[in-house]
Image (cartoon, rainbow, N blue to C red):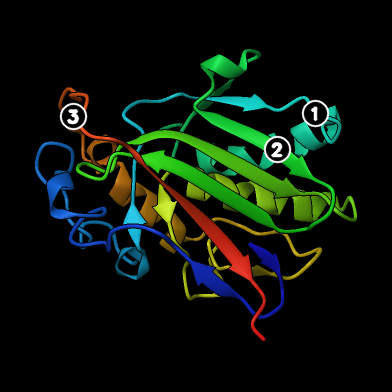
Amino acid sequence: MRALTGVGLILVGALLSGCGGGGAQVGEQRVCSANTFVPNYVPQLERLLYWDRFPVTVYFERDANYSDYYRTLALQGFDQWVDATGNVVRYQVVQNPDAAQITVYFKPDTRNGLTTYTYYPSNGRLRDAKVEIGVRGNNPIDIRSVAAHEFGHAIGIGGHSTNPEDMMYPNFVTSVPLQISQNDLNTAKTAYCNYFIGRSRAAVREPDETPVEATIVCGHNH
């Protein structure tokens, strides 16, 4: 995610098809289609992934760039998804990095964000994620917004919306708070549709495959 400039989106991995990133995800893990919760931008995504259960565990890297202030702002951004989904999306902050599913880093040399995640391609289940939150300028509105945007990627939204009104649009205007739109919410609900239509998710079997890594990067257009 970038402050408002030209953006090129790089996504690595399989193309999205159907509900959430590949036919294998429909059936055992998916019981609804991309048309169940509309409007959304599911068809625009490279992939739509999911965690097999909540809460996901979050660890803040205690390096030289860490501060409790940044952590508080980041959690306020994450909480936008908790609130919007009615506590379906939940997280737990842990103190042991080995217990973390999502690891968060603060980057003082940029205002932008970046998310890298590892997932199983046959069913789209997330294994772990790394979130980088730019804090250059120390603007609390921007830090909170970038954190919320990157957490959207970390919970499985593998791509960006083309609508500037959406949280998951790739650009942002500094000092203007980002809010989760109905498009954003419906896209997340599609990833976790079982929770929103009153069905339990089938037991997850560990895939017999090597997980793959993908990084969402925003860069300058020349």
Identified by mark 2, the residue type is Tyr
| Residue ID at (23%, 60%) | 34
Assess whether mark 2 and mark 1 are in contact (beta carbons under 8 angstroms). Answer: yes
Question: Which residue bears the numbered disc 1?
Answer: 63
Task: State the separation of the CA atoms marked 2 and 3.
Answer: 31 Å
How many dots with numbers?
A: 3
Residue 212 coordinates in the image, percent (x, y): 36, 43
Residue furthest left as drawn: 27
**Which of 216/36 is in front?**
216
Label 3 SS: loop
Q: Does residue 173 appear left or right of residue 18 in this picture?
A: right
Question: Which residue bears the numbered disc 3?
Answer: 208
Q: Which label number is shown at residue 105?
A: 2
Residue furthest front as drawn: 210
Q: Does residue 35 appear left or right of residue 100 in this picture?
A: left
Q: Which part of the image, by quadrant, shows the C terminus?
A: bottom right
Identified by mark 1, the residue type is Asp
